[in-house]
Image: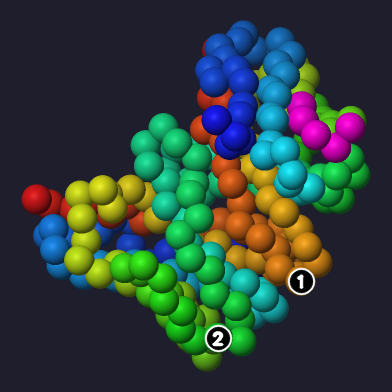
């Protein structure tokens, strides 16, 4: 079936550097794409979303880029902090409004 | 705390026993979702409700699983005749669905099931 996947299972960055987490999706009919952050022992937490008719959206220290041509989604975190260490999931929402999650990327921030 | 509440947080049971999890969503949210998550994987969709109506149930869900949301508020997820493969974190989430936007999901901290 359709799925959302991730290129890299882990990413290690130095504190203060920018982080880029990538995701490939396969369902071109999805209306929304979302990034969630999950810390150990907690449920996923919404970070930012982007509608399929957009290619870029910025939040506080985060930017999501959507490239529909190659079905690619990325999350950029500026000035990465130790508190950003977590697992990041990309997710897509097709017309059924059921959120479909990918497998996740673990981000390690080195002090 | 007005977030999504799940209980019990941890449940250890023997194979063949029944278990029930409860989720109390954020009060004004009309949608409620159940997901299952195993180690290293993303949450896997199980089912969701809009108010008291169960709108979709995953084809991966066997008939041993049943969920209810009787009054459109809290929900229960029951697993009958548990198997070791049912061991996972069961996550509940709620959202406001307004028709024009799916709305972000607000997750609880999950109920971890261990089947011995």
Residue labelled with disc 1: B100
What's the distance in space between the residues labelled 2 and 1, CA to CA? 16 Å
**Quadrant housing residue A51:** bottom right
Q: Chain of mark 1?
A: B
Q: Is residue B77 left or right of residue B52?
A: left
Residue A9 image position (x, y, % from top left) = 34, 56
- The answer to whether A77 is drawn above or below residue B53 in the figure is below
Q: Is residue B91 above or below residue B112?
A: below
Of the pair B100 and B62, the residue shown nearer to us? B100
Q: Is residue B72 magenta?
A: yes
| Numbered range of the magenta stretch | B71-76
Report x, y in % for residue A50.
Answer: 54, 75
Quadrant of the rendering where the N terminus of chain A is positioned: bottom right
Q: Residue at x 38, y 42 (%)?
A: A39
Evaluate whether residue A103 shows in this view.
no
Helix, strand or loop for disc 1: loop
- Seen at 20% across and 49% down, the residue is A82
- Name the residue carrying label 2: A54
Residue under the point 85% across and 44% down: B51
Q: Position of residue A108 (x, y in %)?
A: 22, 51
Determine the image quadrant of residue A81: bottom left
């Amino acid at each position: 079936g359709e799925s959302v996947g991730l290129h890299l299972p882990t990413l290690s960055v130095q504190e203060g550097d920018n982080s880029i987490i990538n995701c490939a999706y396969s369902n071109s009919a999805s209306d929304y794409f979302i990034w969630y952050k999950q810390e150990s022992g907690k449920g996923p937490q919404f970070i930012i979303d982007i509608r399929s008719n957009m290619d870029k959206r910025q939040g506080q220290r985060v930017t999501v880029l959507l490239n529909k041509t190659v079905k690619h989604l990325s999350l950029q975190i500026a000035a990465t902090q130790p508190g950003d260490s977590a697992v990041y999931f990309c997710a897509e929402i097709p017309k059924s409004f059921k959120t479909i999650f990918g497998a996740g990327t673990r981000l390690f921030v080195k002090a | 705390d007005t977030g999504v509440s799940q209980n019990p947080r941890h449940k250890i049971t023997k194979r063949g026993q029944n278990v029930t999890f409860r989720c109390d969503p954020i009060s004004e949210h009309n949608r409620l979702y159940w997901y299952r998550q195993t180690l290293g994987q993303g949450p896997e969709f199980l089912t969701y409700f809009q108010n008291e109506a169960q709108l979709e149930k995953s084809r991966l869900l066997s008939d041993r699983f049943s969920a209810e949301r009787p009054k459109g508020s809290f929900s229960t997820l029951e697993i009958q005749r548990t198997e070791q493969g049912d061991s996972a974190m069961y996550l509940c989430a709620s959202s406001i669905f307004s028709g024009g936007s799916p709305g972000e999901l607000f997750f609880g901290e999950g109920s971890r099931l261990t089947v011995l």
